[in-house]
Amino acid sequence: MVALRQDIARFLQRASSQQGGFGGIEDILGELHDSTPLPQDDEPAGGLREDDSVIVRLGNQIILDAHVQGASDIHIEPYAARHDTVVRLRIDGHCREYQRIPPSYRRALVSRLKIMARLDIAERRKPQDGKIQFRLPTGRDIELRVATMPVASGDEDVVLRILTASEPLPLSALHMTPHNLERFETAIRKPYGLVLAVGPTGSGKTTTLHAALGAINEPSRKIWTAEDPVEITQYGLRQVQVQPRIGFTFAAAMRSFLRADPDIIMVGEMRDAETAHIGIEASLTGHLVFSTLHTNSASETVTRLLDIGLDPFNFADALVAVLAQRLVRTLCPACKEAYQPDEAAWAALRQAYGEGSADATLYRAKGCEVCQGLGYKGRVGGARTVGGE
C-alpha cells in the first residue's frame, strides 16, 4: 500500500495513546461491555469499582486522548441510569462529543477522577475543586484543574481543564496589530502603574502577561508573580502558587510581595475589592503591577473596578493600560479555499481596512480529515484593543 508522509504521521499520532499502556478507548469500552454491569443503585458488589484496572485505564485514556486532540476542557456528563454518560471535549473553543460510557459505570468513573484529584468521593451533595498531576507516556507532566458539580439526577458532572505548562511566548508571536503592539510595549516599560489584560475565561490573558514579563525580565528588576495555578514558568521570575484553602489568597500574596522588595508584581486575577485596592496602592508606591480581569472590553474594565469601590482619583493615577483580547478560530491550512465575496462584503472590508483591502485574497472554511470536517484548526489572538493614558 502507498501512504503519504502526513497520513502516516497522523495515524501514528492517533495510535500513540496506545503506546502508554492504557489501551485504545474502544478496547477499554469493549472490556466494560464484557464486564458484569453494576446494579442500578451503583453498589459495587459484583461490578467494577473506581479502583478497578479498567476504570483506571478509562480515566487515563480520556485525559490522554483529550491532550492529543488539543482539548482545553473535558466534560463528564452523567444522565442517571437510563442514558449513557456523555464525554465532551472543548477543542478550539467549541465542545465536541468524544465518547459515550455505559450508564452503569458513571459513578465509578466520576469517583476515579475524584480520587485522582484527592477529593472526597463520599460527598456528592456539594461542588468540590481539586487538581490532578498527570504524567503522559512521553514522561511529560500536565496539570488538570478539576471541578465537580452535583446535578438534578443525583449524579455529579466533572469538568477537567487541561493546564499544559509551557514556555512563554515572545510578544511578536501574539499577533497584535503594529499599532497595538507599540502602545502595549510602551505601557509595560513604565516604571510604575497598573496594566490589565481583560477578556473571557480561556482567552489567553495569562499568556499575554507572561509574554509581557518576558520582554521586561532583566537582572536589574525583581519580579514576583502570584498565580493559581502556575502554568507558565520563566527563569528570573519568583513565582508563587496561591492556596486559598489555607488563607494564602491573591491579596495575602500581594501584601507579602510589598515586603519583599519588588519592582514588578503580577497577580493572576483581581477577584475581589481587597486585591484591587492593594494593586492600586502598589502601583501608586512605585511598582509596576500586572493583572487580569473578566470583562468584555477595555472601557468596561474601568466601570467594573469603580463598581468594586476603588477611589476614582487614585485609580486614574494608577492605570497605565488595559488590553482586551479574544481568541478566534483559524482556518484549517490543509483545506481552506479561496473565494470571491459579493460586493456588500467588499464594501464592508474597504470601510474597515481601507481601499488597499481590495487586493486581498479571502479564504473560507471547507472541512477535511485533518480538522475533522469543521474547516477550522487552532486559534489565534484577535479583536484586541489597547486603551490607556
Image: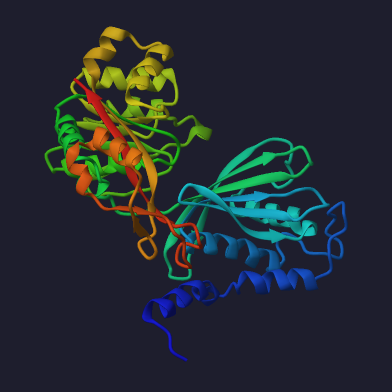
Residue at the farthest front position = 343
Residue 286 appears in the rendering: yes
**In this picture, is 129 found above or below 82?**
above
* Residue visible at 39% across and 64% down in the picture: 335
The figure's colour scheme reads rainbow
- Camera-nearest residue between 160 and 48: 160
- Camera-nearest residue between 235 and 371: 371
Residue at the farthest left position = 220
- Side of 345 where 3 appears, left or right: right
Residue 116: which quarter of the image? bottom right
- Side of 252 where 261 appears, left or right: left
- Camera-nearest residue between 302 and 230: 302
**In this picture, is 82 found above or below 192?**
below
* Residue visible at 25% across and 20% down in the picture: 319
Residue 139, given in percent of the width and then of the height, sits at 43, 68
- Side of 237 where 43 appears, left or right: right
Residue 345, given in percent of the width and then of the height, sits at 34, 40
Q: How many marks?
A: 0
- Side of 76 where 108 appears, left or right: right
* Residue visible at 31% across and 9% down in the picture: 312
**In this picture, is 311 found above or below 362?**
above
**In this picture, is 104 found above or below 31?**
above
Residue 265: which quarter of the image? top left
Quadrant in which the C terminus is drawn: top left
Residue 78, given in percent of the width and then of the height, sits at 72, 49
Residue 322, given in percent of the width and then of the height, sits at 28, 27
Residue 205 appears in the rendering: no
